[in-house]
Image (tube, coloured by chain):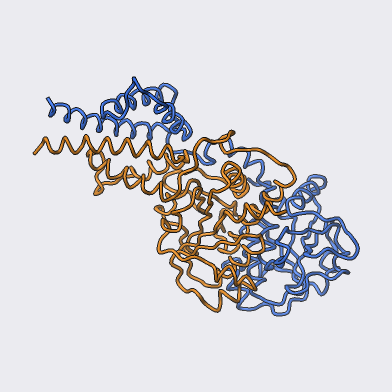
Chain colours: A orange, B blue
Amino acid sequence: MSRPQLQLDAVRIVLVETSHPGNIGGVARAMKNMGLKHLTLVNPKRFPDIEATQRASGADDILQNALHAPDLKTALADTHFVLGTSARSRHLPWPLINPRQMAQAVRDTLQQQETSQVALVFGREDRGLTNEELSCCHAHVHIPTQADFSSLNLAAAVQVLAYELRMACIEKTNQDNLAHPWGTSWDAPLASGEALEGFFAHLEQTLIDIEFHDPQMPRQLMTRLRRLYLRARPDCTEVNILRGIQTATQKCARLRTEKAK
Amino acid sequence: MSRPQLQLDAVRIVLVETSHPGNIGGVARAMKNMGLKHLTLVNPKRFPDIEATQRASGADDILQNALHAPDLKTALADTHFVLGTSARSRHLPWPLINPRQMAQAVRDTLQQQETSQVALVFGREDRGLTNEELSCCHAHVHIPTQADFSSLNLAAAVQVLAYELRMACIEKTNQDNLAHPWGTSWDAPLASGEALEGFFAHLEQTLIDIEFHDPQMPRQLMTRLRRLYLRARPDCTEVNILRGIQTATQKCARLRTEKAK
């Protein structure tokens, strides 16, 4: 039974701007019950706090070892597969899975590449994740709820996803299933969150340089491009190719500008 | 979507001698989120209580309609299938299932006889159910937990079981959703093979124009780009955006070439 733990160790829970410290404690307890260890707090309103410690009921180690990040992108810099919880359907549809499919996808990701880091991201108690934060995710997870009473307590939402991860880990010990996300072993490691954000920043600048994109009139351009590339889950080689293309494109744009002078 | 509600209506949650009213409220919220309505309280320590109402976060109807029973046998008098939650293995082995098997068993029971009444029984926060209470149950449900930190919060335990019931009810709907490649309805139709080939031809020409790609020395460039974009399964809007970027890029390349002349 050592292998399941190894896998769960690759998963971190990321809480974005949590208001109530009691919820952070409840999350820590749910995590420890299910065998998760790594908690990242993005800009919590009150932490550390006695209420967090009380609700943690002994999961103090998780609270003490929690990492702190000033924003979501920093929290995700070294991750390879990011799933954001979303209660509502958004303006722009994004790949949407339920908690069971989430656990399957995480398991497949870790089978493909053992060193992958996975993040499950949970938003604010009252407003969830912003559209910008949701656009940092490869896919969105929706916990099926009653339509007219759909807002889960934060710790309850973490409990459900952590439970599904644990069930998937136990299942794996029973049936050694060689499923890869793409049905085969891959030739290059998945790109990290930092590598992807570097790519997106470079892409946006290139689109400005060639006068395709006006940041004053963004429409949904960058969001749509993020969704497209994240869906494909690019590997490192692919990100290098795309950045090479951007550099060559920028060179063209510079020469054109110089000509215009 | 009316049938899942009908089935869940046959299930009641029974809490035995709960100490903390906040937990009763948390249970009510978890139940309402998952579509369960019927709560029975066996000899609660403090109820009604402001803490219960606060943690219920709007599931007041479940608290108000809760039935009260002096002991477990009274609470179970009109039930047909009783499942008790148990963290520990007991002196006398009893049929033991996990939450997923519990949901399957409840569904089978209700399919066999629609009028059956089902009870899920949860014990005290500190000591669970007594052996006598566990002997009132047809089977015991164990939520898989970390061995050295196995005590779930009461509302979290109810959340996990209620979630599994809901998943079992909507399984058919989930399968229907899998008909959508991304688990949700999309805002634009998938691009056709013809549209994709038009895009790839345009992409290759653009990469030649910006002197990134040499068809005499193709390496695996176009193959890798095809693999990347095809994996994402682009929709029509996305293909239009990508072709727009290529057209803008080619314009830059042309202006540069003209300058060089």
Q: Position of residue A223 (x, y in %)?
A: 37, 45
Q: Position of residue A60 (x, y in %)?
A: 60, 72
Residue A17 vs residue B228, the one in the foreground: B228
What residue is shown at x 39% (from left), y 24% (from top)? Answer: B195
Q: Is residue A35 above or below residue A95?
A: below
Q: Is residue B42 above or below residue A6?
A: below
What residue is shown at x 54% (from left), y 68% (from top)? Answer: A65
From the viewer's perspective, is B208 left or right of B232? left
- Across the whole image, how many numbered discs are drawn on residues? 0
> Which picture quadrant has residue B252?
top left
From the viewer's perspective, is B30 left or right of A115? right
What residue is shown at x 57% (from left), y 59% (from top)? Answer: A149
From the viewer's perspective, is A190 left or right of B203? right
**Outermost residue toward the left?**
A261
**Outermost residue toward the top?**
B216
Q: Position of residue B4 (x, y in %)?
A: 68, 48
Residue B156 vs residue A73, the one in the foreground: A73
Residue A184 vs residue A119, the one in the foreground: A184
Q: Position of residue A33 (x, y in %)?
A: 67, 63
What residue is shown at x 88% (from left), y 64% (from top)? Answer: B135
Q: Quadrant of the C terminus of chain A?
A: top left
